[in-house]
Image (spheres, grey):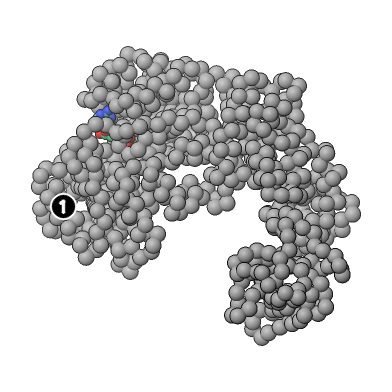
Amino acid sequence: MSGIGPKRAEALAKLGVNQLGDLVELWPRRHRDRTRTTPIRDLIEGGTYTIVGRVRQASFNQGTGKRPTLRVLLDDGSGTISLIFFNAGWLAKKIQPGNRLAASGTVERFGRGLTMSHPDIEHLAEEQMPELGLIPIYPLTAEISQRWMSDLMKRELPTLLPEATEPLPESVRSQYSLPERTWALRHQHFPENGDQLEASRRRLVFDEFFRIGLAVHWLSGRTQEASGWIQRPDGVLAQKFVASLPFQMTAGQKTAWSEIAEDLAQPRPMARLLQGDVGSGKTVVAVLSLLAAVDGGHQAAFMAPTELLCEQHYQVLVRYLEPVGVRVGLLTGQTGSRQNLRRDLERHQIDVAVGTQALLSDQVAFDDLSVVVVDEQHRFGVRQRARLSGKAQAPDVLVMTATPIPRTMALTVFGDLEVSQIHGSPPGRSPITTIHLPYRERKQAYQAVLKAVRAGGRAYVVCPLVNENPELELHGAVELAEGMKSMGGWQVGLVHGQLTMEEKTQVMQAFREGTVNVLVATSIIEVGVDVPEATVIVIENAERFGIAQLHQLRGRVGRGTEPSTCFLLSDPRTEEGKERLKALVEHQDGLTLAELDLAIRGPGEVLGLRQHGVSGFQLARPLTDLAILEEARRAARRLLAEDPELLDPKHQALKLWMLDAIEENAVQQVLS
Ligand code: ADP
Ligand code: MG
């Protein structure tokens, strides 16, 4: 890079600038609002100001054991203020009494006087006034100063910017009232006012979303050509299955199913997320989707995260489907006769395979897998689906989750998944009463358990650990089950992750039949487990579980017609813990809880994303820029509907720009 010494070039490289052109997208971290100067007399604690004054004193205190501190007393005739800099020996040489300085920063009160710590400063000649406006603050390294960087930008951008291409076709820009990209780039660095900065940011954020959205749709368009399956969503098996159900499907189930059925009947591979609160009846919709494949003579797979849940799904499928001649197989990490199962799958002697992630392993091969349903998994991204397509020709994929995330957020995270929702839950459900008990009232919960089982019902007791931890005062399922067994009055079973599949199955079976009426468990039963007779759940050390988890656990009861109760046993020590329990006590609805969770913890945590937004985006913040995100997605979709291969000459710049994004892996980063 011309005019830049090797040391600084190295520093710039650390910031991702390897050639001058990269400067264009080295965005300011923020802008300092320096639209006017303020007399020191008028400063108010907590405000951010720019002041101009003369240095009265400058004292550098090397200190012993303390941080070396530079104190500068600035006087503008109206008053004085101390500027404080820590660890800034180098600055001490530069600031001398008599200098004229501009300083920008936030005013704090220190004892009786006002201070600014680490303000941005600028030396001024006599009579010179500081530059005013929105001043960009760039990311820096030790070798580079803010001033140097800013000068570099001012020098280089005027020649670099006109070379920037305009990827968006005129039609998109005018429809969404977006300024030209060059304009946006310039004003992201040097806006004259807040409005310009805002308009510039909107355009650039739109570009980031649009580019990724376009790439994702374009890529999935590729697989479309590879031809998906045309399923038979209304075949004989499906009809028989619906007829054999002991209930009518709810309106919510029907609507969701009709959306899915429509997708399945199209040759385009389905990629859909089914959201439905705990107990809303997602399994029925899943089974119908599986049958759409079998009715067309193809295979289907049903994946679930735990063996316990796989086992349960397997039983449901066997009960409903074997009578009508559908062959079902269970393939989990522990299934003994895996060899045979795998052979049967490959020879198409099994129509529907139920299993954990083990289904994705390389040893498992299908004859013609065409529908995959993934249960209780809200993050089954492009990458996992890619693994599936290694086993099959672009199967139709349905991902189901009860972890309720607001729809818009789902769009963000799943990128290219369509979203369906089951509204409402089956009729006749009694609401669940949630009660938070401090440990001194713990007995009350177990009395309710006893009462429930005496009346012929069932109860769960959930512990955070398999074995107790007395130091942390955490209960363990093993010890608790022992204790309860010795008391009598109930039939206690124990289930946790360290048991073998056979042991787990046996206990669950006994619990289902009622020979065991109290099931002591770890959070292994968190998702999916469905025993409608259960009416009480006691959650020990409830503060150890998150909101979504507690909501899921609570969803194990309230599945029948009897009123149910959920006891949260806890002496929460933190405010956050208290808030979480309160949220559960006050709210039943999963969506509301998800939003509260979001408010309490912040989005990064909830979605398992990095704290600072999703990687792959520079300026965009997917959770707060939702409006722009939706616009960009819509625009991308529409453009590709008009020109699927981007062959129009007007779309060539756009196509190259999109291909770059795919190459840079930005797409994978965002969506995997
Ligand atoms: P989830 O959405 O949590 O996976 P399930 O599919 O396990 O819910 O369904 C919960 C319970 O509701 C099951 O016992 C199921 O048999 C029952 N169920 C499902 N659909 C209906 C319906 N339309 N009417 C009555 N009960 C239903
Ligand atoms: Mg379920």
Question: In terms of depth relative to the viewer, which is nearer, 507 or 52?
Answer: 52
Above or below, comparing residue 125 to residue 93 in the picture: above
What is the crowding at mark 1: few (fewer than 14 residues within 10 Å), some, or many (at least 20)?
some
Pinpoint residue 516: horizontal percent, then vertical percent: 16, 45
Secondary structure category for the residue under label 1: helix
Question: In terms of depth relative to the viewer, which is nearer, 343 or 353?
Answer: 353
Q: Amino acid at mark 1?
A: Ala
The mark total stands at 1
> What residue sits 79% from the left and 66% below the top?
122
Image quadrant where one finds the C terminus: top right
> What residue sits 61% from the left and 21% below the top?
641
Pinpoint residue 70: horizontal percent, then vertical percent: 72, 78
Splitting the image into four quadrants, where does ligand 1 fall?
A: top left
> What residue sits 68% from the left and 49% below the top?
194
Pinpoint residue 467: horizontal percent, then vertical percent: 30, 59
Quarter holding residue 406 = top left
Would you say 331 lies left or right of 445 here? Answer: right
Q: Residue furthest bottom?
A: 64
